[in-house]
Image: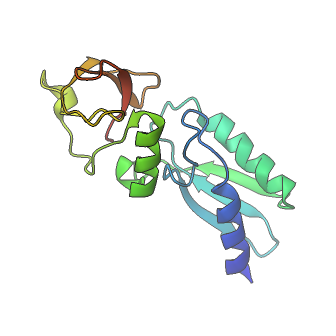
Amino acid sequence: MADKIIDTIHQLLSTIPDPEIPVISIVELGIVRDVQLSDDGAVTVLITPTYSGCPAMMAIEQEIKSTLHEHGFENTTVKLVYSPVWTTDWIPDEAKEKLRKYGIAPPAHSTSDKSVLSLHPRSVACPRCGSLKTTMISPFGSTACKSLYKCDTCLEPFDYFKCH
């Protein structure tokens, strides 16, 4: 019975969009780490921020509590878990494709990107036309998780979701 309830909670959490990137859910983003159910029916949702100063975490916490409360889970606690550190490797390929279609270049398949430490930023494909002829405009994009790029082929600016 508990497994079925936890599955239901996971399904509910998968309907909550990330407040900064509404095309993917908080589950798809990989920040929902675990759901625990106590013997008395209390729910604890463990989440990991994409980075330690993420300003969206309070909004995410409130949305989790609100969504679960609306579905009868009135005794809900959200706990932040910082270890292990969140990584873009936790974003599934389907969610990365949603990012691309939304106009955000998805993160590469590895967190070993050290290009931000050098003067040679990684080659990032334009999410609109697919060209690899792109230029980083700024290591900081619309949020701290993204860098701002410009496509040298279609001339469109776009965000790149940085690898963590």
Q: Residue 104, position in %: x, y?
A: 41, 34
**Do we see residue 31 in this rendering?**
yes
Which quadrant of the rendered structure holds the N terminus?
bottom right
Q: Nearer the viewer, residue 5 or 128?
A: 128
| Residue at the image point whose x is 71% and y is 78% from the top | 4
| Residue at the image point whose x is 40% and y is 41% from the top | 100
Q: Nearer the viewer, residue 42 or 143?
A: 143
Name the colouring of the figure.
rainbow
Q: Residue 83, position in %: x, y?
A: 43, 52
**Picture layout, residue 159 above or below residue 65:** above
Instruction: Give the number of marks.
Output: 0
**Picture layout, residue 2 above or below residue 134:** below
Q: Residue 63, position in %: x, y?
A: 72, 43
Q: Quadrant of residue 42?
A: bottom right
| Residue at the image point whose x is 59% and y is 55% from the top | 46
Q: Residue 132, position in %: x, y?
A: 19, 33
**Do we see residue 92 in this rendering?**
no
**Picture layout, residue 126 above or below residue 135:** below
Q: Quadrant of residue 103?
A: top left
Toward the bottom, the furthest residue is 1
| Residue at the image point whose x is 77% and y is 76% from the top | 39
**Picture layout, residue 105 above or below residue 4:** above
Which quadrant of the rendered structure holds the C terminus?
top left
Q: Quadrant of residue 161?
A: top left
Q: Nearer the viewer, residue 3 or 135?
A: 135
